[in-house]
Image: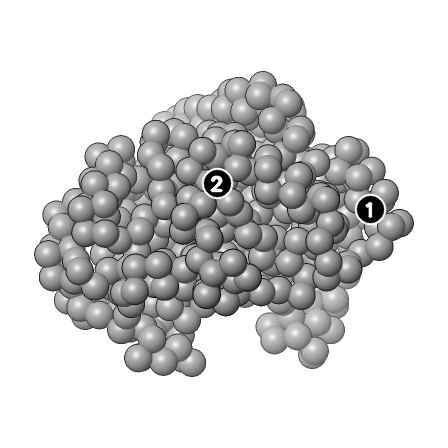
Amino acid sequence: MDLQKSKIAFQEAQKYIPGGVNSPVRAFKSVSINPPFIQRGKGSKIYDIDGNEYIDYVLSWGPLILGHCHPEVVKALHNTVETGTSFGAPIEMETKLAKLICEAVPSVEMVRMVNSGTEATMSALRLARAYTNRDIIVKFIGNYHGHSDSLLVKAGSGALTHGIPDSPGVPEDIAKNTITAKYNDIEGLMEVFKIYGDKIAGVIIEPIAGNMGVVPATQEFIDFLRDITYKYGALLIFDEVMTGFRVAYGCAQSLYNVMPDITCFGKIIGGGLPVGAYGGKREIMSKISPIGPVYQAGTLSGNPLAVTAGFTTLKILRDNPKIYEELEQKAARLEEGFKENAIKLGINIVINRVGSMICTYFTDEEVEEVYDYETAIKSNTKMFARYFEEMLKQGIYLASSQFEAGFISATHTIEDIEKTIEANYNALKKLTL
Ligand code: PMP
């Protein structure tokens, strides 16, 4: 595989952009290959500036559930761009998108658009804190909610300590209001509530964690979380930036049959344009400015192009429920094929999958199940890196880290899936040599 032009482009980019990228994971730091620079995408495929073609399982990190350049989305965007790209004034399409989201997700009665998932979770925390008049936020180890100060926090030393900054620049004074707990650990969470219960404004969770591979919360954990937050008067915040409209049209909360107080969205609801949103019960959302005292704003929020792409995408998903069935079938076949290959070649892997979100963990014999951060990080990242490179060479574009979810789009064909299974066999075989 020739990546010569990409290599030069990457060198040039590094002169002017930190690390040559506008989001760190794009730099391929954990693998020894430089990132292909992408020229265009169509359906399930992307093409780099060296002319290589890839089947894309990153899909812009989740948004492109309909694949690249879906004709209806492109047409809607064309029409919108002709009429103006931003006004900073209300447009009807904002209401149309908000209505679609509220109709799809019963826990959401009102929704506020922002520009990224980070903004959505950051604003949700402010709202939860203001609504409860409390400061402490509980988050789970291995869950990622964007890069705002309160959420860029890791566990302090020892269980149940205040969080410590995960990055220089996050003040300790802010991090100390974030308590980190273990994912899928009911007892741990119970302890947290026993100690901090009446100070907890909210608990934020990725109901199906997609930032440590793919790790679904158990039903018992979610049920417990709902009960204990009610009991202590804390808000339950579902971060569905990744899972929203990905795992089901009703989002992850429909699979768990739970009503969170606030839900954060991003990715799919922008159809590939920069977007985020947070929503919830009318009573809670009414605290937001201009009807309430909680300030939150955005020059480009509800941007005409972003809401048009999001609305068109959601409408297609709503009107074609078969898309989710087909995604499930294709993803299940991929999982089955990968598992068969691993068994044939005697390689230990664990595959976690929920609908079209999938992760292959290179585990050793001890780990039979990946259910939290600790079990996830036991994976053999060196082996993953080699696997990743072998897949890329065969035209399969995966996320370059072991701890990312892979995604399938409605445009992935069964041929794409079979080709990927074959490539997976070849790549795994190389690992045994
Ligand atoms: N929450 C989750 C669950 C995410 O996966 C992400 C991004 N991958 C974010 C929040 C942050 O979203 P953004 O990158 O749009 O700020």
Closer-to-camera residue (28/74)? 74
Q: Where is residue 387 in the image (x, y as percent from the top left)?
A: 49, 46
Task: Determine the residue positioned at 46% across, 65% down.
Answer: 293
Q: Position of residue 431 (x, y in %)?
A: 44, 43
In the figure, 229 relative to 18: above or below?
Answer: above
The answer to whether residue 47 is seen in the rendering is no
Inspect the image, locate mark 2, and give the three-letter code of the amino acid beneath it. Glu
Q: Are marks 2 and 1 in contact (CB under 8 Å)?
A: no
Residue at label 2?
Answer: 109
The answer to which quarter of the image holds residue 412 is top right
Q: What element carries label 2?
A: loop
Which image quadrant: the C terminus?
top left
- Near mark 1 (Cα within 10 A), the count class, few <14, some 14-19 or many ≥20, is some
Task: Determine the residue positioned at 64% across, 58% down.
Answer: 301
Q: Is mark 1 on a helix, strand or loop?
A: helix
Closer-to-camera residue (28/365)? 28
Inspect the image, locate mark 1, and give the three-letter code of the amino acid beneath it. Thr
In the figure, 246 relative to 241: above or below?
Answer: above
Q: Pick whichever of labels 2 and 1 is earlier in the sequence.
A: 1
- Mark 2 or mark 1, whichever is nearer to me: 2
In the figure, 343 relative to 432: above or below?
Answer: above
Residue 80: assigned label:
1
The answer to whether residue 296 is seen in the rendering is yes
Task: Determine the residue positioned at 24% across, 60% down.
Answer: 200
Q: Position of residue 251 (x, y in %)?
A: 46, 35
Q: In this view, does 253 lie to the left or right of 270?
A: left
